[in-house]
């Protein structure tokens, strides 16, 4: 029996991927320091899957703690989610972001190499495309990160590519996410941000549940159909399925590759807000405020490579996204607490 190790396995995307892997018949280990997540998510994953998983509290900067996992369990592959992810915070604490996101990945790879485990799926981000103007964005889009968070993701991609070039026995898939949203259809697991949400959907759901008075929409004068920014929103269940597909791809020994995980569909902020209100029969008060510096009008994926190579594409609709998001929030108004 062998295991798939998830670093950051109790987080938003990690927990949904853990559930997908358990349902696919895999044995799963979560390794997480719970700095931005709750072990409660994994308890619920086990309930949903009807299977247990190994849960270890630890930090990817702790090489000894990582090594202890590989000594105890036969790990066949790693999905690396662990890292810091707030753009604004990264501009205030850049060294922390580089140490954790880049340094943590280096430590992880060193330990993996020590134990001969060389299959890795890395959780990257579409932020590596910077303020690219020409959506849809293929993987060949020039990369130029605009903040320390994005730069830490891009630097990590470089580290991993150099590693695989130096040792062809490594198989590495880099997954560039666009905008993960939604929750498991059960309403038992979902996105539980600390403090003020960084993303649109938890802001909408917190307004709907009464935790916040209104939604602020940044900019109403973009050159789009309704004046609001257009983005690519991918249901987290589809995103989790993309990780399962990437692991299956790596099992064939495919070297290094990069994939966009997105729907390929551009939806505006008002598309999301109005559909959320209509499907869930709720009011979502909002006001327009000034654009945020650096935001572009349209930003969405060309996911054709993932479809061709991984045989993966999104299946969830916008209605699924808004329904599942609200189902999670109304059942868990205070998240996992």
Image (tube, rainbow, N blue to C red):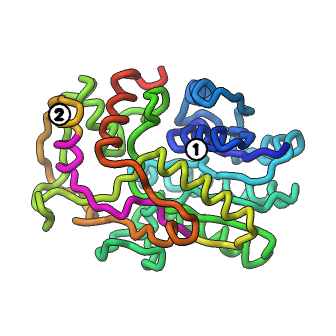
Instruction: Tell me where residue 10 sits by quadrant.
Output: top right
For image coordinates 57% across by 25% down, the residue present is 44
**First along the sequence among labels 1 and 2:** 1
Give the foreground label among 1 and 2: 1
For image coordinates 34% across by 41% down, the residue present is 320
| Alpha carbon distance from label 1 to label 2 | 30 Å
> Residue 303, how many percent across, how many down?
44, 67
> Tag 1, which secondary structure?
helix
Nearer the observer, 26 or 136: 26
Classify mark 1: residues with Cα within 10 Å, few (<14), some (14-19) or many (20+).
Answer: many
Q: Is residue 286 above or below residue 94?
A: above
Q: In this orientation, does residue 67 appear? A: no
Q: Secondary structure at mark 2?
A: loop
| Residue at screen point 69% across, 46% down | 60
- Report which quarter residue 229 is drawn in: bottom left
Between residue 276 and residue 100, name the one nearer to us: 276
Residue named by callout 2: 284
Tell me which residue sits at (38%, 72%) in the image.
Answer: 137
Q: Is residue 224 visible?
A: yes
Q: Which is nearer the eye, 13 or 130? A: 13
Give left or right: position of 303 versus 265. Answer: right
> Quick check: 135 above or below 335?
below
Residue underneath mark 1:
17
Give the percent coordinates (x, y) of residue 34. 60, 33
Q: In the rendered image, which quarter contains the N terminus?
A: top right
Q: Position of residue 161 (x, y in %)?
A: 66, 73
Stretch in magenta: 258-275
Q: Residues within 10 Å of mark 2 (few under 14, many from 20)?
A: many
**The stretch drawn in magenta includes residue 39:** no
Q: Position of residue 235 (x, y in %)?
A: 41, 47
Q: In the picture, residue 58 is in which quadrant? A: top right
Labelled pair 1, 2 in contact (Cβ < 8 Å) = no
């Amino acid at each position: 029996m062998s295991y798939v190790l998830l670093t950051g396995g109790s987080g938003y995307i990690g927990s949904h991927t853990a559930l997908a892997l358990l349902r696919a018949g895999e044995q799963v280990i979560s390794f997480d320091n719970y700095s931005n997540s709750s072990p409660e998510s994994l308890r619920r994953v086990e309930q949903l899957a009807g299977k247990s998983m190994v849960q270890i509290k630890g930090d990817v900067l702790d090489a000894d703690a990582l090594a202890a996992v590989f000594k105890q369990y036969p790990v066949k592959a790693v999905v690396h989610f662990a890292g810091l992810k707030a753009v604004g915070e990264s501009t205030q604490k850049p060294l922390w972001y580089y140490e954790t996101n880049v340094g943590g990945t280096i430590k992880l790879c060193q330990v993996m190499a020590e134990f001969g485990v060389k299959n890795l799926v890395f959780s990257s981000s579409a932020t590596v495309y910077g303020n690219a103007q020409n959506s849809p964005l293929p993987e060949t889009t020039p990369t130029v990160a605009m903040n320390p968070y994005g730069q830490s993701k891009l630097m990590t991609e470089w580290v991993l590519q150099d590693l695989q070039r130096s040792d062809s026995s490594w198989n590495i898939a880099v997954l560039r996410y666009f905008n993960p949203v939604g929750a498991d259809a059960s309403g038992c697991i979902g996105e539980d941000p600390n403090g003020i949400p960084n993303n649109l959907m938890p802001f909408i759901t917190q307004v709907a549940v009464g935790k916040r008075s209104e939604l602020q929409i940044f900019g109403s004068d973009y050159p789009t159909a309704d004046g609001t920014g257009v983005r690519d929103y991918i249901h987290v269940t589809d995103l989790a399925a993309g990780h399962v597909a990437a692991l299956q791809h790596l099992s064939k020994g495919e070297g290094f590759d990069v994939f966009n995980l997105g729907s390929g569909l551009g939806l505006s902020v008002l598309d999301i807000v109005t559909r959320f209100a209509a499907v869930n029969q709720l009011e979502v008060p909002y006001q327009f405020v000034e654009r945020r510096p650096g935001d572009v009008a349209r930003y969405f994926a060309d996911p054709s490579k993932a479809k061709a190579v991984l045989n993966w594409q999104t299946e969830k609709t916008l209605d699924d996204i808004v329904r599942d998001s609200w189902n999670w929030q109304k059942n868990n108004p205070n998240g996992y607490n």
